[in-house]
Image (tube, grey):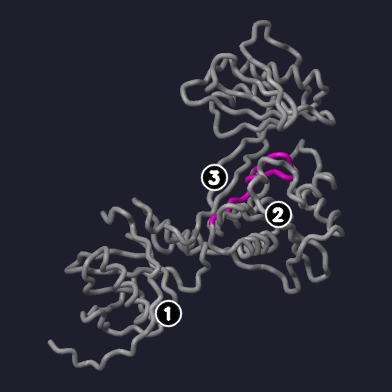
Amino acid sequence: MPNRHPPATPTTLHPARVFLEPTLTRDGTLDGAWWPHSNDLPRELRALVRVLEDRLGPILRVRLDTTAWEEVPAHLLIDGRFVRISGLPATPNTIRVIRGSQDGFMLLVIPPHTAGPIAAAAMRTAARTGNTLSADEILDSVRPLPSLSPPGTRTRRYRDGDREAVLALVDADRLPGQPPCTPRMLDEAVAGTSHPGPWSGLEPPTTDVLTAADGHVTGVVAYAAHRDHGAGQLLWLHGHEMLDVVEALVLHTLHRLGGGGLVHAFTAAPCLGVAGLPTARRPVTRKVLEHAGFAARNSWRCLRRTAPAASRVPARSRVEVLTSTTPPGWWLKSRDDDASAELVVQQPGDGLGVLWWFGAAAGHADEELERELLSRADALLHDHGAKQTILYAAGDPEPSWALFGAAGFEEIDHLVSFTRPDASTG
C-alpha cells in the first residue's frame, strides 16, 4: 500500500537507553527498563523500537500510560511500518511492547529527568532475572530522598580554620571505645597520608565542607579519583546524621567525581581506625548512599570488651607469633594451616588494644586453634597494658561468635563499605 502521508522531517534521535532481562524468558514481573530522554513520545518511541527490533524482531504495537507523555498518536510510521499505540492505564510507569498477537514484553519506564545513578539502579533491578518487584516498587526503592537543604548553604574547600569544627563532626560519629581523632590525624587525612595502603593509587584527596548561611560548618566530606582508571572514592563523610547535610555532601561528591562512573565509599579509614560505615549508628548516611545507587560491598563486625585482657598462655600452643608493621604489633597464625583463622594484634596505646580477626576458609574452622589465637592475643595485650579492647572481625566468621562472647566481647556495630557501579554499563 503506498504511503499517503508526507515524509516526516528528519530528526536526530538519541540512542534509546534500554536494559533487557538477559534470558527473555519473561519469568519475572518485568522484562527490562527504558529510560527515555524526554516526554516527546514520537521521537522517543522511534528510537526505542529501532533498538528493540534488533533483539525482539518486528514490533507491531505498544501499550503505555498515556498520561506520562505530551502527545500520544494512535500510530507511528517507523521505518516504513505502522506501530499502533494504545493506553495501558492500570500499570503506570510501564510500556508493553508487542511483537504479534499477545506476545508482549513489559518494560519499566523511568521518568526522563531522573538522575543518572538513580535511573541506572532502577534499570538494573528491572532487568534482573527473576525480579518480582513492580514498576512502582522499583521506582519507590530508588527514588531520591527529598532535599531539605536550607537556603544559604554552600560547599567549599576545607581550610585550616575549619579544623576544630571538623574534629567535632568526626568525634560525634566515634564508636564507643574508639580514640578521638587528633588534629594530627585530621591533617594527615586531609593530606592523604593517613595509611599508605588505602591511599595508594589515588590522586591527592579533596576535602570539602558544607556551611550554613551563617558560615558555620555543618558537614565535611573527602573524596579522590584513581590515577589509573575512572573509579572514584568517597573516603569519609560526617554531618551529624542530618539528612539535608548528608544528602548534599553525597550528591556533591558524585558530581565532583564525574556523575556516572564507578565509585567506592568508606573503603579507607583516615581518622576512626577502620574502613567502613557504622551502619547502626549512621542509618541516615547508609540510606542516602543506597538511594544514590550504592550497594554494600564488604563488612567488618566491630566488638568491644571493657575489661582488661587475661594473661593466660597455652602451654603448648600451635600459634606462631610474627611481627606486624602495618599496623605495628603482632601477626598470629597457625604453624601448620595457612587457611585457618588469623589474628593481628595492634600494639596497645593509651590502654586501648585493637584486634583484627580474619576467619578461616571454608572447611578449615578449628575451635581449639581459635581459642589459642585469642588467648595468645590477650596475653600480648595484658603485657602491654591494655585496659579495654576493640575487635574487628572480617566477613561473617560464624564459628567465632560464641568464642568472642565467652571472652567478654559485645558487638557494637557493623561496618560496611559500599560500591556504586558505573551508571553507563549494564
**Dot 3: within a 10 Å radius of its alpha carbon, few (fewer than 14), some, or many (20 or more) residues?**
some
**Residues under numbered marks 2 and 3 in contact, where contact means CB atoms less than 8 Å apart:** no
Question: Does 244 appear above or below 317?
Answer: below
**Dot 2: within a 10 Å radius of its alpha carbon, few (fewer than 14), some, or many (20 or more) residues?**
many
Q: Position of residue 98 (x, y in %)?
A: 24, 69
Q: Which amino acid type is marked by label 3? A: Arg
Secondary element under disc 1, as helix, strand or loop, is: loop
The residue under label 1 is 39
Distance from the alpha carbon under mark 2 to that under mark 3: 22 Å
**Dot 1: within a 10 Å radius of its alpha carbon, few (fewer than 14), some, or many (20 or more) residues?**
some
Question: Does 91 appear above or below 278?
Answer: below
At x 34%, y 87%, the residue is 10
Q: Is residue 360 among what the camera can see?
A: yes
**Residues under numbered marks 2 and 1 in contact, where contact means CB atoms less than 8 Å apart:** no
At x 47%, y 59%, the residue is 121
What stretch of residues is rendered in magenta? 262-275
Q: Is residue 273 left or right of residue 421?
A: right
Q: Is residue 74 left or right of residue 94?
A: left
Where the C terminus falls, by quadrant?
Answer: bottom left
**Residues under numbered marks 3 and 1 in contact, where contact means CB atoms less than 8 Å apart:** no
